[in-house]
Amino acid sequence: MGQARQIGQVLVNLIVNAAQALPARDGVVEVSTLSRSSEVLVRVRDNGVGMPAEVRDKLFQPFFTTKPVGEGTGLGLAVAYGIITGHGGRIEVESEPGRGSCFTVRLPVAAAEVPVVPASAPEQVLGVCGTAAAQ
């Protein structure tokens, strides 16, 4: 259960940010979903420029931006964070400079309306560097 337009706004923001972080050639943005018994996950992964820890630590602060003056307000990820936490979820980021970023949105499941992957099944996740890893 949730506000579809708000969730859509979060996903558009993550996809646009991922696209803007891509190298001029051979850039890839991957969007994947997974449902579990208690939560639904949406991942947006890119093979873009990535971020150092000092940038990751500030990503969700209002008005923080790495974009040049006049190209970003620094509100997109702060708003996304507010929307997701307002839905009882969380948003996580993994990133390494030169290896890309992966944002994971975790939202609680309100009813057993979605097919569920058993908790014992390994989850295939593309790591920041693009290799498959079981979690």
Image (spheres, rainbow, N blue to C red):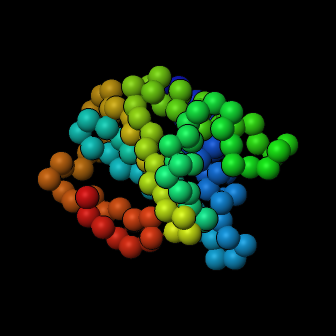
Residue 45 appearing in the image = no
Give me the residue at 38% from left, 45% from top. Answer: 41
Can you say whether 87 is above or below 91 in the image? Answer: above
Q: Nearer the viewer, residue 35 or 71?
A: 71
Residue 123 appearing in the image = yes
Can you say whether 120 is above or below 105 in the image? Answer: below
Residue at the far right: name it.
70
Residue at the far left: name it.
120
Q: Position of residue 114 (x, y in %)?
A: 33, 40
Q: Nearer the viewer, residue 113 or 105?
A: 105
Count of numbered circles on the image: 0
Residue at the far bottom: name it.
26
Q: Position of residue 101 (x, y in %)?
A: 51, 58
Can you say whether 93 is above or below 101 in the image? Answer: above
Give me the residue at 74% from left, 49% from top. Answer: 67
Res 127 → quadrant: bottom left
**17 sits left or right of 82 in the view:** right
Position of the C terminus, as image quadrant, is: bottom left
Give me the residue at 79% from left, 50% from top. Answer: 68
Q: Position of residue 64 (x, y in %)?
A: 66, 38
**70 sits left or right of 31 in the view:** right
Residue at the far top: name it.
86
**40 sits left or right of 94 in the view:** left
Q: Position of residue 1 (x, y in %)?
A: 42, 26
Give me the residue at 56% from left, 57% from top. Answer: 51
